Image (cartoon, rainbow, N blue to C red):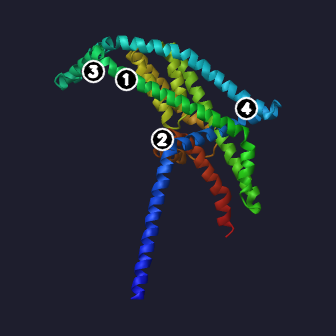
Amino acid sequence: MDNKGTRISNAFQLGLLGGLGVLTAVALGNAFLTLANIVTYVALALFIALGLEPIVSFIETKLKFKRPLAILTVVGTLLIVLGTLIWSILPMVIEQTGHFIESAPALLGSVQQLDVVVSLDNQFGGSVSKAIEDAALYLTDSSNWPTLVGGVVQVGLSVFNGFFGALIVLTLSLYFMSSLSRLKTWIYSLVPASKRDTFANLSEQIAGSVGRYVMGQVTIALINATLGFTMMSILGIEFSLVLACITFGLALIPLVGSISGATIVVIVALTTSPNVALIAAIYYLVYMQIEAYVLSPRIMNQAVAVPGAVVVVAALAGGALLGILGALVAIPVAASIMLIIRQVWVPRQTSR
């Protein structure tokens, strides 16, 4: 009887501990989801700080600037460039958006007359033309404007939230850059003294590879945007400056960024003429081959020594797990893992 009571008591305790474990896991999961934005901001700020560290170190060592002044020089230059771009682009975007809203019905009417649309309309019994007419009626009906305005308000709120997030990331980046050496020293102190030198050396290599990767990716994106802007200006494609900025931002994303930017440019080029869109498509096909086989190997191989297959798998996995941020950090993370395997795991296995 006593054994039976003991078994029941043990089972009750085991069930209670299991239930508490499940509740703790759920609470931790909810806390992580609640703090997901903050974790993202911190990770992005640390990534930016490591990416700008090579420039700050260059100014600090070569130009003999003190570190706070070097940081302010780098950040101030970036803010001036970004502010100049926004100041030059924003009026154009507002003007062109108003022009698009005014000309949307006429644009839909011209689309309706295209041969491919007429062919599709004949195949589907007039449903394509009816959909275009319904869209034109919706845009011209003043009773629908409050809905459109509501959508604009939501976009405005999203822009405000994005600006607030960017401000947080900028502040955290400044903090990380100013205290990076102290932060590294504190992290190194947590490692046992016997392994501290190895850990510090490995960490410095990882931080250096992240910084070189960021600078290499920015260089490739800048080349993409500059050459694309030149091409669009020659062909007379509208919104060339806006599109160049969009392609620059998208080109920072590995693998899919350049393709996405090229697709947007070609679609916008269709509003100029099909021939212009064809020339733009041919240009990007040629450029992507040059980027893949000439620019990226020369620039990125000096930053991170990662095989092409690992780059593809890492970028896809990072994008699937964490979206754009995951795609951005996937390659340096993969390079760091390979560095740890090469310098820690392989020698340990060899010595056995």
Q: Distance between the residues labelled 3 and 1?
A: 34 Å
| For discs 3 and 1, the disc positioned in front in the rendered view | 1
User: Which residue matches tag 4?
Assistant: 71
User: Which residue matches tag 3?
Assistant: 116
Instruction: Tell me which residue sits at (43%, 78%) in the image.
Output: 9
Asked if the residue at tag 3 contacts the one at tag 2, i.e. Cβ–Cβ closer than 8 Å, the answer is no
User: Which residue matches tag 2?
Assistant: 323
Instruction: Tell me which residue sits at (65%, 61%) in the image.
Output: 346
Q: How far apart are marks 2 and 3 (CA)?
A: 35 Å
Relative to 61, 206 lies left or right: left
- Please tell me how crowded label 1 is: few (under 14), some (14-19), or many (20+) other residues with Cα within 10 Å: few
Quick one: SS at disc 2?
A: helix
Asked if the residue at tag 4 contacts the one at tag 1, i.e. Cβ–Cβ closer than 8 Å, the answer is no
User: Which residue matches tag 1?
Assistant: 150
Q: Distance between the residues labelled 1 and 4?
A: 41 Å
Q: Mark 3 or mark 1: which comes first in sequence?
A: 3
- Please tell me how crowded label 3 is: few (under 14), some (14-19), or many (20+) other residues with Cα within 10 Å: few
Q: Distance between the residues labelled 2 and 4?
A: 29 Å
